[in-house]
Each structure stands twice: as structure tokens, then as C-alpha cells.
Image (spheres, rainbow, N blue to C red):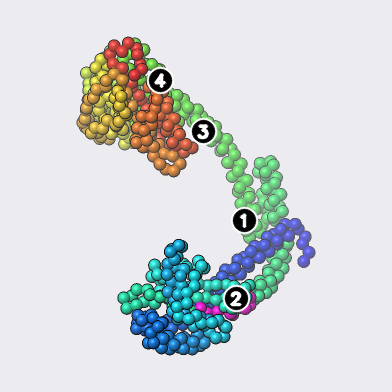
């Protein structure tokens, strides 16, 4: 056949290649399945021979197992005579009974002692005498021994292919079954080996038939398919390709659509109509993409503004109260998205009282950020009204947040009021993380108390309150769950234990250094894993009244 088009040659070459690969795959699969089927037939025959041979092994004979006894010798002669007949009629190469003992060095069942051995006379193999011992090194047989002795297998098969060697048995299969005493204990193994002399011839015949059929079929298919390609497909395909090339360069609608030029109702005609629709969709998509990109850029700019506004709402001037040298305070927030739901705050209620706040709004993104703004504003405004305890502040904030909370958002809050002159802190924990406190000459430890429900979870809630005292040199560390739940690429959590270890291993003086090094510890743990939650921290180092500005321990 003379090919008139390069694409025809390419398609036919591809079809030929695929056909050859499929034919090869079919041959391999068929060859393997055919071999397995023949092998199973030989294995079943050997197994049936083994079961028949096992009937000769009486409990009395197995119990005696002493070649010096006449009774044992007479029974052995009788067994070998019957097994010789069985081997001849069943075309078995070997029938043998043996025990396998564990070697002291390798711990494998490599020490094999033959009790009865019969070789088919036609093979030329000699019979092993009773008690003959060999050392087995073939791993296949060692695995078979272990299967029977240790795992209780009732049938083990070993196929050996050695057509290239001058081995008397050639391709053969061995089937082994256990021999039990009256207590069902394995006291020996009965094996039957059978040659698979017809295997190579049968497999070669199978392959020849497959190749001949495939070659004839391929010749017919290639001839018919080449004609069809040349006459029915190439012309419309060229036209479609030309139109696609034109559209790729011009990106404009065609003056005459392909559907008007190619009226074929087959897949080629459908392809032409799809190209027309695709061109129309692409032109519309480019217009929409331009518009959406412009809108996304505007949204991104607005989110950046919102991020800046949110950041500006949090105290960022440090030190915040230069007139107070009784403490050193620092805080930071790293949102997981453009805007976050975490927040911190600290502010003076009066000259001797400072409020400390750290909170985490449920959810992320813009809704959480809006809820965060409301919660933060309410907490500060209500706290600065004066004469209210932390529990009373949270109760009032809870009442106001529960009004029209259609999104069912809530916020976990730790709120403490520090009495600067004494170091005493009155606090309330609404479902938030436990604070970590380091006393002078001590280590950071979690200060655990009973928690109240989160704020805005339910109207009318009351909040527990507790107090503790900071001595000069003590450090208070507050954080959101984004610290403890930071996750690395192996889905491992940073956890509070690692957090405490990191805090206790820090060699820092200032509150800012503590938070900076803690953020580095979290980043080193998570590595390249993305940040899933906001990370917010607040650290207070207390020096006490009349510290004289000395901020070192």
C-alpha cells in the first residue's frame, strides 16, 4: 500500500505498535496462565500420588522408626515395593519420606534425613538408604519445611525450571505434605517429585498459534484501516487543524464556522462543531477572565487593607507604657490567611491595673476577623468601665455577642487583670489554652484551672474566676491553639510538651526575644508545611514594684 499522508503513516505506525504491545501482553498473560494451568495439573497429580503413598505409612511403622528392628525393615521393604509401583504408574520421579532438623548455626531446617526413598527406575536415580542425611541449602525447600513445621501447611508446592541444565529431572514440580503421629504432631514430610516433560513443547505450540493468528489478523486490519484513514478522515482533519491554527494566532471568531464546511455526522463532524463551540467559549472566557482578574485584584487590595486595619487594631507599640518599669510585655499575631480570628490586647484600666487579653474566634478568614473586631472592642470597652472582675466582663461580653449571632460564631478568651503594685492577677478562662508560668529559678509549667465555656456559645452563661500571684522575676506566657496545634509535613502536632520544652530551653532576657525565639521553634518544627491556624502569643515578664528599671533576672 502506498501512503499518501504522513499522518496516515503515523496513525498506522501507532496502531501497529499498540497492536504489537497488546499481542505481546496477551502472549505473556496467556503464557503465564497456561503455564500455571499445566503446573497445577502436574501439582494435583503429584499431590494425589503423595496422598496415596501416605496410606502405606502406618502408625506402627512411624512409631518404630528404627532401621535395626526386623519388623521395621520388613515394613520398609513392603513400603518401597508399593511406592515403586506407584511411582511407575503415576510417572513420579521420586517418592520420599524424610525429617528436617534445625541447624545450630543457621537455625534453618537444613539437616534432612531420609527415612524412605524411592526413585523411578526410568530416571536412573539411585535410592537413598534409610537414615541417609544431606544438608539442604536451596531456600525454596527451606521455606517449604518452615511452612509445614511451623505454620501447619497441609500442602506445599515447589516448581523448578532447569531446561538449560543437564539435570535428570529437567522441569519438575515437587509436592510435600506433612506426616502426623496419633497426636497430630508433624513427625515427617512426604514428598513427591514429578517431571513436567511436556511443558516446553505445549507452551511453544501455544506461542506459535498466537503469533500466526496475530500476524494474519494484523495484515487484514492494517489494510482496511489504512484505506479508511486515507479516504474518510484526513481531509476533514486537515481542515480542522487549519482552523485551529488560525484561531490560535488570531483568537477571533471564524467567518464561516467549521460545522458549515464539514457536514459529516460522525465524530469528525462532532469535533468540528465542538471546535466552533470551543472558539466561542474561549473568546467569552478571555473576556470574563479579564473581568474576574480585575475583580480579584481589587478584592486582594481590599483584603490587604483589611489586614492592615486589623493589625492596626492590635497594640504594636513596644514598650507600650514607658512610665511603668514594673513589667516587660510583648505580643505578636501571625494570621493563617490574609485576616485572622485571633487577637491579643493589653491596656491600663487605671494606674495600678492592666488588662491582659488573648482570644481565638472560631473559624478563619473574613467572618472570624469581623467577629474578632466586635469581641475585642466589647472586651476593652466593658473592662475600662471599671470596677468589674474578669468574670463579670466576660458575662457582659457574652450577653452582647449572643445577640443576633446568626453565624453561631464563638470566641475562646483568657482575660486577666494584673494588679501592678502586688503582682496579683485575677483571671477568667473561657475555653482557652492554659497559660504557662515560669517562677523565679523554676521552669515554665501550665497553670491549669477549671475552664468556663467559650464566649458567645450560649446566652446567660456564668464564668469562673481564679487568681494567682507573680513574684519579681516571674514570666507569664499566653498563646492560642495555633501554637500547640502547629503541624509538620508528617501530620505531627507541635503540642504543649514541645512548647514547654522550647520555652525552657530559651536563653532570652526580654519578652520580645522569648516570642521571637518561640516563633522560630514552631517554624523549625513545621518546616515547609502550610500554616493552618493563626499563631498568637503574649509574654509578660514581671519585675515588681520599685524595680528601678532593672529588667534582668
Crowding around mark 2 (Cα neighbors within 10 Å: few <14, some 14 to 19, many 20+) is few
Whole-angstrom CA distance, mark 3 to mark 4, is: 30 Å
Say left or right for 20 vs 439.
right
Q: Is residue 461 above or below residue 325?
A: below
Q: Say which mark, if any, is on residue 296.
A: 3
Residue 226: x percent and y percent? 72, 64
Q: Residue at x 65, y 57 (%)?
A: 268
Q: Quadrant of residue 126?
A: bottom right
Answer yes or no: do the residues labelled 2 and 1 have beta carbons within 8 Å? no
Q: Quadrant of the N terminus?
A: bottom right
Question: Mark 1 or mark 4: which is in front?
Answer: 4
Left-right relation of 28 to 238 = left
Label 1 to label 4, Cα distance in Å?
64 Å
The span picked out in magenta is 193-205
Name the residue located 47 percent from the left edge and 74 percent from the top edge: 133
Q: Earlier in the sequence, mark 4 or mark 2?
A: 2
The residue lying toward the viewer, choosing from 277 and 14, is 14
Of badges 2 and 1, the one in the foreground is: 2
Report whether residue 448 is seen. yes
> Taking the image as drawn, is residue 330 in sight?
no
Q: Residues within 10 Å of mark 1 (few under 14, many from 20)?
A: some
Find disc 2 in the rendering and name its residue. 167
Can you tell which mark lies on residue 270?
1
Looking at the image, tell me whether mark 2 or mark 1 is earlier in sequence order. 2
- On residue 316, the disc is 4
In front of the other: 121 or 39:
121
Amino acid at each position: 500500500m502506498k501512503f499518501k499522508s504522513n499522518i496516515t503513516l503515523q496513525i498506522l505506525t501507532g496502531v501497529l505498535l499498540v497492536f504489537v504491545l497488546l499481542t505481546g501482553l496477551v502472549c505473556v498473560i496467556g503464557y503465564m496462565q497456561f503455564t500455571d494451568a499445566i503446573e497445577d495439573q502436574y501439582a494435583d497429580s503429584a499431590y494425589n500420588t503423595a496422598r496415596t503413598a501416605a496410606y502405606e505409612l502406618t502408625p506402627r511403622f512411624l512409631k518404630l522408626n528404627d532401621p535395626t528392628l526386623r519388623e521395621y525393615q520388613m515394613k520398609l521393604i513392603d513400603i518401597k515395593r508399593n511406592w515403586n509401583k506407584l511411582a511407575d504408574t503415576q510417572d513420579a520421579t521420586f517418592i520420599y519420606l524424610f525429617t528436617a532438623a534445625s541447624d545450630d548455626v543457621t537455625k534453618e531446617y537444613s539437616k534432612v534425613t531420609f527415612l524412605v526413598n524411592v526413585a523411578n527406575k526410568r530416571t536412573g536415580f539411585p535410592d537413598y538408604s534409610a537414615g541417609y542425611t544431606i544438608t539442604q541449602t536451596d531456600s525454596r525447600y527451606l521455606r517449604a519445611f518452615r511452612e509445614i513445621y511451623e505454620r501447619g501447611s497441609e500442602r506445599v508446592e515447589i516448581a523448578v525450571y532447569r531446561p538449560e541444565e543437564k539435570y535428570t529431572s529437567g522441569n519438575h514440580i515437587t509436592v510435600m505434605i506433612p506426616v502426623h503421629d496419633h497426636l497430630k504432631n508433624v513427625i515427617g514430610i512426604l514428598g513427591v517429585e514429578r517431571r513436567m516433560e511436556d511443558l516446553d513443547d505445549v507452551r511453544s505450540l501455544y506461542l506459535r498459534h498466537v503469533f500466526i493468528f496475530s500476524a494474519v489478523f494484523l495484515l487484514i486490519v492494517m489494510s482496511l484501516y489504512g484505506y479508511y484513514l486515507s479516504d474518510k478522515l484526513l481531509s476533514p482533519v486537515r481542515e480542522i487543524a487549519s482552523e485551529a491554527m488560525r484561531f490560535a494566532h488570531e483568537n477571533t471568531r471564524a467567518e464561516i464556522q467549521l460545522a458549515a464546511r464539514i457536514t459529516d455526522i460522525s465524530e469528525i463532524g462532532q469535533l468540528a462543531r465542538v471546535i466552533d463551540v470551543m472558539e466561542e467559549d474561549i473568546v467569552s472566557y478571555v473576556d470574563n477572565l479579564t473581568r474576574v482578574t480585575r475583580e480579584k485584584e481589587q478584592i486582594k487590595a481590599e483584603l490587604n487593607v483589611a489586614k492592615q486595619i486589623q493589625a492596626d487594631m492590635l497594640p504594636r507599640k513596644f514598650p507600650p507604657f514607658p512610665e511603668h518599669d514594673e513589667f516587660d510585655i510583648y505580643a505578636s499575631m501571625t494570621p493563617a490567611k490574609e485576616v485572622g480570628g485571633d487577637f491579643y490586647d493589653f491596656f491600663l484600666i487605671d494606674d495600678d491595673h492592666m488588662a491582659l487579653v488573648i482570644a481565638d474566634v472560631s473559624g478563619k478568614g473574613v467572618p472570624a476577623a469581623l467577629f474578632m473586631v466586635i469581641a475585642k472592642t466589647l472586651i476593652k470597652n466593658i473592662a475600662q468601665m471599671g470596677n468589674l472582675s474578669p468574670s463579670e466582663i466576660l458575662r457582659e461580653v457574652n450577653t452582647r455577642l449572643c445577640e443576633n449571632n446568626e453565624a453561631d460564631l464563638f470566641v475562646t478568651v483568657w482575660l486577666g487583670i494584673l494588679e501592678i503594685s502586688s503582682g496579683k492577677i485575677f483571671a477568667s478562662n473561657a475555653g482557652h489554652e492554659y497559660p504557662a508560668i515560669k517562677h523565679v529559678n523554676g521552669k515554665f509549667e501550665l497553670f491549669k484551672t477549671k475552664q468556663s465555656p467559650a464566649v458567645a456559645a450560649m446566652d446567660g452563661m456564668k464564668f469562673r474566676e481564679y487568681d494567682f500571684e507573680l513574684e519579681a522575676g516571674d514570666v507569664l506566657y499566653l498563646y492560642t491553639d495555633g501554637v500547640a496545634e502547629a503541624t509538620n509535613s508528617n501530620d505531627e502536632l507541635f503540642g504543649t510538651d514541645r512548647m514547654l520544652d522550647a520555652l525552657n530551653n530559651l536563653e532570652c532576657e526580654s519578652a520580645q526575644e522569648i516570642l521571637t525565639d518561640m516563633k522560630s521553634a514552631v517554624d523549625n518544627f513545621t518546616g515547609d508545611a502550610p500554616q493552618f491556624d493563626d499563631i498568637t502569643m503574649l509574654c509578660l515578664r514581671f519585675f515588681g514594684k520599685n524595680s528601678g528599671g532593672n529588667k534582668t533576672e
